[in-house]
Image (spheres, rainbow, N blue to C red):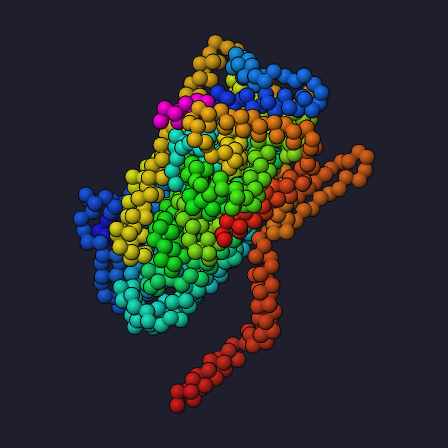
Amino acid sequence: MIMKIAQFILILMVSPFLFGVINRTKAFFAGRKGAPLFQLYYDIAKLLRKSAVYSASTTWVFIAGPIVSLSAIIVASLIIPFAGCSSIISFEGDLVLFFYLLGLARFFTCLAALDTGSSFEGMGASREVQFAVFAEPALFMNLAALAQLTGKSSLTEIFSSSQIHYWASYGPLLFLALFALFIVFLAENSRIPVDDPNTHLELTMVHEVMVLDHGGVDFAYILYGAAIKFWILGSLLTGIIFKGSSYGWGVDTIIFILLMVLLAVVVGVVESTMSRLRLLKVPHYLLVALSLSLIAFIISLR
Amino acid sequence: MHFLLCSLGILVISGLLAVCSSRSFKAANVIGALGATTACALGLMAFFPAVNTGPSSLNIPWAIPFGSFSLSLDALGSVFLVPILVLCALSALYGFEYLKHYYGKKNIGSVWCFYNILAASMIAVVLARNAMLFLLAWELMSVSSFFLVVFEGEKKEVARAGLIYLIATHIGTLFLLVMFILLGRESGSFDFADWNTISSDFIPSAVFLCMVIGFGTKAGFMPMHIWLPEAHPAAPSHVSAVMSGVMIKTGIYGIVRILTFLGVPLAWWGYLLIVIGITSGVLGVLFALAQHDLKRLLAYSSIENIGIIALGIGLGILGMSFNNPALTVIGFTGGLLHVINHAFFKGLLFLGAGAVLHETGTREIDALGGLLKKMPITGFCFLIGSAAICGLPPLNGFISEFLIYFASFKGVFASLPVTIMSLGAIVSLALIGSLAVACFTKAFGIIFLGKPRSAHCEKAREPNILMRGPMLVLAGLCVLIGLLVPFVIGIFKQAVFDITQMPFNVIDASLTGTVSSLSYIVITALLFYFILLSLFIARRGLLRKREIRQVVTWDCGYARPEARMQYTASSFAQPIVDFFKGILRTRKSVHKINEYFPKDFSYQTKTTDLFRETVFKPVVNVVYRLAEELTFIQHGKLQIYILYILATLIVLFIWKF
C-alpha cells in the first residue's frame, strides 16, 4: 500500500515535467533554446500567488469548474496502474469509472466556459463536446478489445495480464490498439493535430479558449489538471508497452518514467512535424481511431 | 396492501371532490394537491415492513366477464411503484404552486381529477394481476393523461399533440389486447396466476412481438415514440414530470411482467431489445441535442433513457437464453435501477424546466440565459439533474449505466453472438454518454449561464418553496442513491428472482462481484468529495486577503459587448448536428446577406422527427386517401344510414341461419 501511495504522489509530482519535455523537443526542432524543463512548475507556483479577477457575468459555476475538473482528474489518477503495479483503487469495471471521471472534468470545464458568456469560449466548449462524441466510443471500443484479449475489465488487471505484453502472438492487435489509443490520446490532451496549445488566435483554439477567462489559482488548477490528464492517459499507452521487469520496484519506476518522457518527446516530434487538421476533419481523424479499434476487437475474437 | 388500497381510494375520492369544487379555484387546488400528496405518502408506508403487516395480495370476484379484482404487490412491482409514489407526491406539491398561475383561466378541478386518476391508475397497473383489470387501468391511465396533455387545448399545436398521443396509445392498446387474448386462450384464464404454462413454441414469440409494440409505444421505443416529443412538452410541467418520469416506465413494467410468463426467452428477443435500445438511445439523444424547445429536448432525452433501460433488459434476456447468470442478473439490475434513477432525475429536470417556464414564460432555449443568478436553487438542482442524466459520477445515473456497462463487459467474454451484442451496447453507451454531455452542457449552459438573451429573463426570480422543495428532494435523492447503492442493491435480488426464477444462491453469487465494484465506486466518490472540498478550501485560503476584482469577459478589446453576441444553443450544437445531418435532416432557412449594408439577417433551423416524416406521414397519407375514396358511403342522409343498419341486420340473420 505504501508503494501504491508513493506511486500516486510520484504521478502528482512528475506529471508537469512532461510538458517541459514537449516544449524542449519543439524548441529543438525550431532551433531555439526553449523554456526551462521545469517551466510549468514555475508557472503554477506563480499563478498560485496571484490575486483573482472574475468576469461580472460569471457565477459559482465558473469557480467550481477548475476545482471539480482537477478533483475528478486526481481521483482518476488513483485508478490508473503504474509500471505494471496495481493501482490504489482497482476493481472489476474500473475503466468505466476512469473514463467517466474524465467526462465529469469535461462537463464542468465546458460549463465554466459557457458561464463567461463569451462567444469564443462557447465555441471552444462546443468543439470540445463534439470531439468527445467521437473520441469516447473509440476509447471504449479500444478498451473492449483489450478486455476481450485479456478476459479482464479492470485497468490494473488488463495491463498486468500476460497477453497484453506477448507481442509475438498478439502483435498486430496490440499495435492497432496502441496506434488508435495514441490518436485519441492526442485529441483528448488537446495536442496537434486536433488542437494547438500554442495558438494565439481565439477563433482557432479549442481547449485554450475555454479557459481564456480563468486566472490565478483557478488557472493553476487547470494547468495542473491538464498535466495529470496527460500523464494518466499516457499511462494507458506505456502500459501496453511496458509491463514491469524483475528488477524490482525502483527500476520499474525509473523505466516507466523514462517511457513517459519518451512519449512526451514523441508528442513533441508530432507537434513539430505535423500541422493542425482543419476543424472539419477532426471527426474523420477520430473515426480512424474507432475503425482501428474495431479491427483490433475483431482480431481479439479469434 | 391496505395502505395502497387506501391510497387508491383517497386518490379517486379527492379527484372527484376536486372536480366538484372547481367553482372555487383555490378549494379545487387545495383538495386535489392535498389528496394526491397524502395518498402517495400513505402508499409509501406499504414499503416499510415494520408498519405494513397486512397481506400482500387481494383477490375479489368481479362481475366483469373474465375479470377478477386481483391485486398483488411483489418486489418487481415495488421497483416501479416506489418511484411512481415519490414522484406523484412531489409533483403534486409542485403542481399546487404551478397551477396558481392559471386561476381564473382554466378549470383547476378537472386537472386535479385527471392527475389523481392518472396516479391511481398507474398504481393499479402495477398491482393488477388480471388481464381485464390491467387493461382497464391501462386505458384509464392513457385517457387521463390524454386529458392532461390537452390542458391548453385551445392552442393548435397542443390539440394536435393530444390527438397524436390518443391515436398512438390506442394502437398500442390494440396490440396489448391481442397479446392478452393470445395468453388467455393458451391457458383458458385471464388471471396472471394461471399463466405459467405455455406449451406452444410459436405463441411466446407472437406474444413477445405484440408486447414490444404495445408496451413499447407507451415506453417510447423508437420508432413507436412519435407521440412522446409532442405530448410531453404540451402537458403542464408537473404532469410532464410524472409522464416522463414514471408513466412511460409502465411500458417497461409491462414487458418485464409479461416476460415472466413466457418461460425461457429466445435469443432473438434479446437481440431485438438491444437493437431497439441502441436505436432509441443514440437517436433519442441526437434528436434531443438538435431541439430548441427545452421540454421537447427533455422528452427526446426520455427516449434515450428508455433506450438505456431496454439495453439493460435486453442484455438480461440474452443472459437468460444463453444461460449466463452474471449477464442476466447484472443486466436486469442495471435496467431496473435505471428505471428508478431516470424517474428521479428526469422528474427533477422537468420540474426545473417548469420553473423556468413559469418565471420567464418561454421554453425557447435561445431566448434564455443567465438564470442561475436569478434562480440559484432551481439552477443548482437543474445542474445536479443534468450531471446525473449524463451518467456522470458520483451521481445515481452513473451507477445504473455502470451496471449496464458491467453486464456488457461480462457479455464480451461470452460466446460470439453475445460478444457482438455486448460490444454494440458498450460502444453505443459511450456514444450516448458523450452526446448526453453535449446535450446537457447546452441545456444548462445556455439557459442558466452567461447573460440573459432576451427580455423574458428580466422578471425571473426564485419560485416559491413548494416548487423549490420537490426539486431539492429529487436532487438529494440523485446524490444519495449515488452513495448508498451497494447497501440497497439487495432489494433488486428479489425483483430479479421474480423475473428469472433463478435460484437465490446463483443470483447472490452473480451480484457479489458487482457489490464489491459498487463499494469501490462509492469509496472513489467519497474521495472525490474529499479532494473537492480540500481544493476548495485551499483556493479559499490562498485568496484570503487578496484582492478580487470584477471585470468584463475577455472580448478582444471590443468596445460594446452585448448579450446577443453570446454563443447560442443552436450554434453550440451545430457541429454535431451538421455531422449527423443525414439522420437529423435539420431544415435551415437562411435569409442571405446580399447588399453591402445589410438591414436584417435571419437564420432558422428546425429538426422534425425522422420517423414521423419518413415512416408515419406516408402511411397516414395513404390512409387518408383511402378514407377519402370511401366518403361516398357517408353523405349525411339519415334514411340511407338506417338502410345500412337494416342491411347489416338482414345479413347477420342470414348468416346465423
Q: Nearer the viewer, residue B477 or B538?
A: B538
Q: Residue at x 38, y 55 (%)?
A: B319
Residue B30 locus on image (x, y percent) = 34, 42
Residue B281 locus on image (x, y percent) = 50, 49
Residue B420 locus on image (x, y percent) = 49, 54
Q: Residue A4 magenta-drawn? A: yes
Q: Residue B179 magenta-drawn? A: no
Q: Nearer the viewer, residue B117 or A107?
A: A107
Q: Which residues are magenta?
A: A1-11
| Residue B539 falls left or right of residue B453 | left
Quadrant of residue A52 within the rendered picture: top right
Furthest residue in direction top, as rendered: B545
Q: Residue at x 52, y 48 (%)?
A: A297
- Magenta stretch secondary structure, dominant: helix
Above or below: residue B612 compared with residue B646: above
Above or below: residue B413 compared with residue B464: below
Q: How many marks?
A: 0
Quadrant of residue B29 within the rendered picture: top left
Residue A140 locus on image (x, y percent) = 50, 43
Above or below: residue A222 compared with residue B628: above
Question: Is residue B24 shown to the viewer in this render?
Answer: no
